[in-house]
Amino acid sequence: MSPAPQPRVTIGVSLKMYFGHHQTLNWARSVADLAARHPAVTGGTAELFVLPAFPALVPVTGILAGTRVLTGAQDLAAEDSGPYTGEVSGAHLHEIGARYAEVGHAERRRLFGEGDTVVAAKTAAALRNGLTPVLCVGELDHVSPDEAAARTVAEAERVLATAAHDGPLAPVVLAYEPQWAIGAPRPASPDHIRTVCRALSDWLAGRPGLSRRQRGPRPAHRARHGRRRPVSGPLRPRPGGGRTHPRRDAGRGGGMSYGLSTYAYFWRLSEKAPRPLTLDEMLADTRELGGEVFQICDYPRIEAYDNAALDALRATAAVYGITLELGTRGVRPDHLARYLRIARRLGVRLVRSMLNTADHRPTPAEATALLRETVPAYAAAGVTLGLETYEQVSTDDLLAVVRGVDSPHLGVVLDPGNSVARLERPVDVIDATAPHVVNIHVKDFSFSRRDGWVGFTFAGCLLGEGLLDYRHMIDTVGPDERGVNQIVEHWLPWQGGFEETARLEDQWTRHSITTLLRSK
């Protein structure tokens, strides 16, 4: 019998202390469900492992039993037994089913003073007890990519050479994370990450005993473009606990991100779909396409989610490293209070709304009064409310409401195409709202003649082929400098049948997010 194929990629996540016990178990159940359905996991091309807090390790291992997801610990003792109060040994971990142990994390080094000697001893303890060490490496100071590569390889060599004194080395996962980039306003560049990981790969290639992969061994790295992903977005406190400005940082801690809205899946989640997409499936697709934000917009089913369902959704987003945002309609206080509760449960920091609903069309003065009543609770929760530009309300009236409330936690969600039907020029809408923008919806649009040249049709089109002056919008608003996320949406007309409509919707979504990511 031929040996089972080795996984081509290993993906791990540490929960640190972000989840409570029951929240961890709910999260683990959602991971088990995802792993049971994902072809990369079921086919053996991807291996997953999770590192929960110690008290949850046994029940999480039980929940994940029968899946291809392994478990491990965020730390372990250097000794196997003895009078070491509060410690957990590698022998204990292996006995309860753990298969990984994280060692050398920057927080353990910084907060508990663990140097190379301790890290090497813990690495050896993991190896002799049948655990795969997840050895965290990364330069302390911001240096050139080549210098960072040299320091990181030297660190790995130093630790593993010391660990080898206690016995032969077995497979090890190297987790690269530049320590200087943790919580920094600017992450390590993609070139920086690639240079260091390439050097680690070359070093590992000459030491086949350290890698389970049969060819092309590559180190895992904890950062995508230098940012930590396992617990990013809504689950990570802002570094340093400092004050933030919601209009400069409405999306997440530091910098602008690109993402998708449920409107990018409008037809595929609609009743016209033979099987509408779920939020979990849209999150998975967003991650696959490189998106960092997912805006659950005008999706009323989420109002029926109980706490367990919301916690599971938040956990799924955390696994993918995706920041969640919400979208609804209306400014009635009770409705916005309901969405604030959902936002807090999901860790959301931005909620988009519109002034009108089918049964409530407040005047600017009425809307201002209602929002003065509501926005303080949003501010207290650290959530920003954004009112979207659209044809039912003039841009002047929308800005009158925002200025009337006069709170940094109330701003504008800019969608220039929405106001065309009010005969407002998109460029004028951009210029007027720019100082107040907290979120951008990116969708292109165009006019086309109706049959017989009798009138026009105003509809969506492929990004870059219509009338959206994207460059002017970005230059005027400055989303990267202000931390304003850009969210892909579409106005895709129905194509006569679901299969063709879904195919084109997927094509437009992929084109839009790829175009935005390439513009970085």
Image: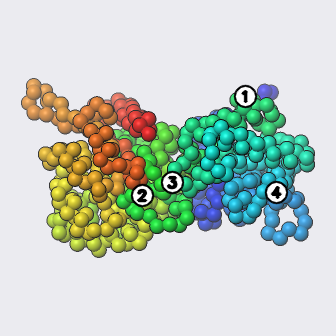
- Secondary structure state at the residue bearing disc 1: loop
Q: Where is mark 1, residue-wise?
A: 215
Q: Which circle, 1 or 3, is nearer the viewer?
A: 3
The quadrant of the image that shows the N terminus is top right
- Secondary structure state at the residue bearing disc 3: loop
Alpha carbon separation for disc pair 1 and 3: 36 Å
Q: Is residue 368 above or below residue 205?
A: below
**Relative to 210, 296 lies left or right:** left
Circle 2 residues within 10 Å: few <14, some 14–19, many ≥20: many
Please report the residue visible at 34 percent of the width from the left and 56 percent of the height from the top: 438
Q: Position of residue 202 (x, y in %)?
A: 72, 32
- Secondary structure state at the residue bearing disc 2: loop
Q: Where is mark 4, residue-wise?
A: 118
The answer to which image quadrant residue 145 occupies is top right
Q: Where is mark 2, residue-wise?
A: 249
Alpha carbon separation for disc pair 4 and 3: 31 Å
Q: Where is mark 3, residue-wise?
A: 185
